[in-house]
Amino acid sequence: MMKVFKNIIFKHLVVTILLSFLLSSCSNDDNQIITNPDDEVFYLPVVVHVMHKGETVGTGANLSEERIKRQIEILNEDYRRKIGTRGYNDHPDGGDSKIEFVLAKQDPNGNPINGINRVDENKIDVPSLGYNQNHYAQYAYWNPSEYINIWTTSLPEETICLALGLSSGPAIDLPGASLLSLPGPDDKEGIIISQHHFGVSDIDCQAKYGRTLTHEMGHYLGLLHPWAGGDCDTNDYCEDTPAVDKPVYNIAFIGCEGEPVMINNYMNWSDDELMNIFTNDQIARMHYVLKNHQGRNALLTSHALKH
């Protein structure tokens, strides 16, 4: 279940395997990707497919470049637990995920790009497949082993605070991973975010600081909600997220083992202004996915990271 409609609950089972390993990741200069074990940072390329209906850039669903870049900054503030930002916390179980997101520098043909692909829905006639990745992939879909596909959707204003976003998850050999929202053989992968909740906005809503993408990216990298399938015994299998068997919003309550729930965890359904923590066990899970899932691992050496 993603942070899509808070009144709809799909059953999930989250798992986390505690790992202790040294990460080999990549950093990049103007010409190449360089393996830099000392840095230990995973760099992941994203393309933002901006779905709109003919509006000029910066109005309506045709989001400005500034707003898109700010959203990626927020994503990195959250995943890197950057001091002086909303993404910082000093919780003993919180950590810097050492994961950074980069707007793609090349399109699939090798042409320079700013990581933004604008698509006028009025100019492309496709059948309606619903609010899902398969529908939006008809307009634009780049190789998911080279790019994390993100679609911002041109949804009507009445969907504000209701339709936030959704993400596909990785099929991987972790217990319970089959209960992620996994693409079938012919399904497309990626993340959908309502234009109202992409980046920072002035809407009167609990989701206006760009945390919808932080949450959905967690699903894309293998995380599920702390309550998972609603089972106190298994929940998300992360020892450092207090066990809980029901959705967590903004109100603290005592969880399954007599300790307060972690309302500020990014994988809850709390307000954007409260969210500020990935735990070390959640980070270990994401690292496992990046090292062991074929498609997610391929992102680390994508040509899209190169100038």
Image: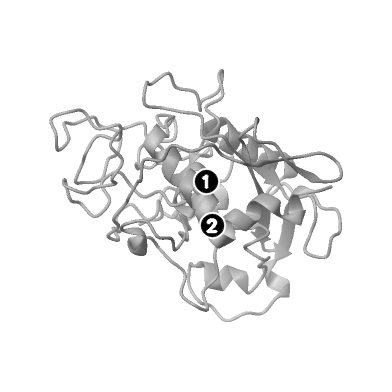
**Residue for badge 2:** 191
* Mark 2 or 1, nearer chain start: 2
Whether residue 72 sits left or right of residue 166 in the image: it is right
Q: Position of residue 174 (x, y in %)?
A: 37, 56
Give the percent coordinates (x, y) of residue 194. 53, 53
Residue on which the image places disc 1: 213
- Left or right: 286 as drawn, with respect to 126: left
Q: Amino acid at mark 2?
A: Ile
SS under mark 2: strand
Residue found at x 57% / y 81% = 127
Amino acid type assigned to the residue bearing label 1 in the image: Leu
Residue 73 is left or right of residue 229, and the answer is right
Determine the residue located farthest toward the front in the rendered image: 21
- Packing grade of label 1 (10 A; few <14, some 14-19, many >=20) is many
What colouring method underlies this structural image?
Answer: one colour
Q: Quadrant of the N terminus?
A: bottom left
